[in-house]
Amino acid sequence: MRSTKEMTIGTPWKVIIAFAVPILISNIFQQLYNSVDSLIVGNYLGKEALAAVSSSGNLIFLFTSFFIGTAQGAAVVISKHFGEKNYTDMRRAIHTNIAFGLVSSVILTILGVLLTPTILRWMNVDESVLPNSIAYFRNYFIGVTGVILYNIFSGILQAVGNSRVPLYFLIFSSILNVFLDWLFVGALHMGVGSAATATSISQLASAGLCLIFLMKKGTTYQVVIKEIKFHKDMLKSIFHFGVPAGVQNSVIALANVVVQSNVNSFGPDAMAACGTYSKLEGFAFLPITCFTMAITTFIGQNLGAKEYDRAKKGSRFGILTSVVLAETIGVILYFSCPFFIGLFIQDDSVIQIGVTQFHTIALFYGLLAFSHCIAAVCRGAGKAIIPMIVMLVVWCGIRVLYITIMMHFFSYDNIQNIVYLFWAYPLTWLISSIIYFAYYHFSDWIHGFEKKKE
């Protein structure tokens, strides 16, 4: 089995598919991984416990999104040097990225444990749900090192074209997570917080396996423990390409926290329903995530090798395929959502709210895919500042403004008014898609790296 994959040779669509399919399978397991907590908690502990887990999701993403986004952006630096066959700088970037991840993990652990109660109250989490939410959130962040390091290690491997090995380790950790969830919550009745503990243990296991693989001698990307340190020039490059991606993620997360805070104001039923929706929506993200990763790596390697026409062909194929697959999943979920929601919780009011959310949003998943794919093109081309600005203005600014105006006129006492919150997503996806369409077709993104050297 080859441990690297040069995406600068071979038929573009075949190369992208070969890279994306393992990530797709990996993401399926990742989504099952993320859904198991809710499935087991909802079925064993009831809708209040499910609401507690659901209330934590967006807040966890808010805390982790910047660091994970920055690490993912750093993969652009690695893939660029790999495409140039500049393995010395590539390894320096790898070790700097790992050092960044270790420091980030310490910061996140401290912030997550200390700030949990305050932030959950800011988010209007119902008092009946708050103790379980705090327990889940704190237990998750005690083990957040595994989450950060797995994303960094898998990003390194994907940057050099190896999307299979992270898949194998994620499959193992997913199976482990299912077993531990059942053991802690179902068999031992250890409560909501133990579901987060199961996730943390599983993530640490997958991160450890990735590290062992990366330390294998004789590879161009070998990790040597004593070489893990900050290289000033590499840290500067990583921040240049990674911070905009991190800010983009944080902006999306912040907007989602605002939405979640408004959802929380509608009560535990709405919290449980919207949390279940987010788990199921994650399956629509599967083709989006795998093709955005493939696109970013493909663009980075090919622009590093100055294969401009090849980069364009690959981007077009990745965008089209992702949009079609995401929209197909959206149509399926539109019609089948009552059944899938019922797997998490058997409560008519919760199911009704979840169905309303799907019927409002699901048919617009193609727009979501298009926006993320163009953002991936920008990151791969060294133009990470563009998606950061678009997300900041549209997915944060306009979305929050819309919600503020809508909820000024409509009461939280009527659960039917929650539909106005749901419309915030397709409306902002449409606006960002229009902007990205114009940028992709009319800007000179293809020469992004050359212009930075000038």
Image: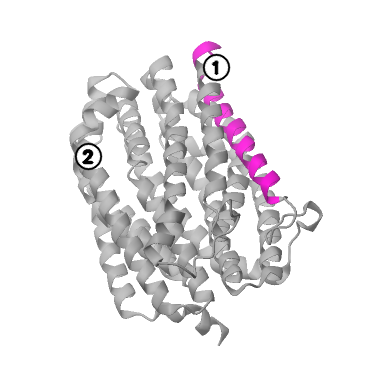
Q: Quadrant of the C terminus?
A: bottom right
Amino acid at circle 2: Ile
Quarter assignment of residue 109: top right
Give the magenta range.
186-214
In the image, is 306 to the left or to the right of 399?
A: right
Q: Is residue 96 at all visible to an observer of this figure?
A: yes
Amino acid at circle 1: Leu
Residues under labels 2 and 1: Cα distance?
A: 33 Å
Residue on which the image places disc 1: 183
Quarter assignment of residue 436: bottom left
Magenta residue check for 260: no
In the image, is 356 to the left or to the right of 8?
A: left
Q: Position of residue 391 (x, y in %)?
A: 38, 61
The numbered disc on residue 332 is 2
Q: Is residue 442 above or below residue 189?
A: below
- Camera-nearest residue between 29 and 198: 29
In the image, is 126 to the left or to the right of 351?
A: right
The numbered disc on residue 381 is none
- Camera-nearest residue between 136 and 400: 136
| Residue at screen point 34% across, 24% down | 344
